[in-house]
Amino acid sequence: MKIRKAYLIDGLFEDLCQVVLEFYLQRAEYFKVRFPSDEELGCGKDDFLSLDEIKVSEWAGMSGAIEVFGLLTPESRSLFTSNRLWDYEFLAGTETLLHVSDFSVRMVFVTPEEQRELDGIGIDIGRWIPVDLNVSHPPRTFVVPFSDHEVAHLRESLYEGLKKHGDSDHEK
């Protein structure tokens, strides 16, 4: 497994986004493309469903949506450049290389080698936003108990503050 850094692509013109798409399209082995039941968001659905050797399953991310998984072949690769797709991923083995959602939210997962290659073709990833996906320790929430005296003091402070601002509808 290669070490990849996650980035949110921001500030790229559409033609440069196409270069990044093609860069990862050539490196990927598999694809996942998701289609909601909404026809407007389901552009290309029939094209992908007509491909050979695909797996179609319900997608847990949205009620009524499906996910199509398959091998990237010349035919399936051409569908990514000819359709405006709502949500898709390119994978190498089990690793996600590129994930596009909501048509234009682009996440890339870059190795140091790919970073050098992208730089060599004029893609400045210095403008991309790094994303830390290692949220292994969620913030802790502490419940601090208040004494009856502290609650009474807080209530009094709130009442006085509301009274100063002309809110006389609140009573003790």
Image (spheres, rainbow, N blue to C red):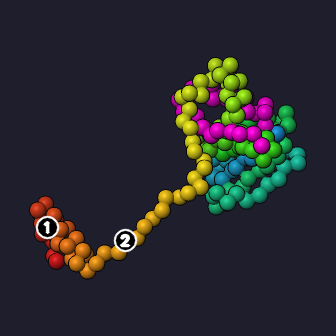
Residue positioned 60% across, 47% down in the render: 133
Q: Which mark, residue 144?
A: 2
- Give the mark nearest the N terminus, 1 or 2: 2
Magenta-tinted stretch: 1-28
Report x, y in % for residue 33: 72, 46
Report x, y in % for residue 76: 81, 38
On screen, residue 23 versus residue 122, left or right, reads right
Please name the amino acid that badge 2 sits on: Val
Residue positioned 79% across, 55% down in the render: 56
Residue 17 part of the magenta segment: yes
Residue 5 visible to an observer of this rendering: yes
Marks 1/2: CA distance? 24 Å
As drawn, the residue found furthest toward the bottom would be 148
Residue positioned 79% across, 41% down in the render: 92
Quadrant, the C terminus = bottom left
Residue 62 part of the magenta segment: no
Within 10 Å of disc 1 (Cα), the crowding (few <14, some 14-19, many 20+) is some
Compared to residue 172, the image places residue 121 above or below, namely above
Identify the residue position indicated by label 1 in the image: 160
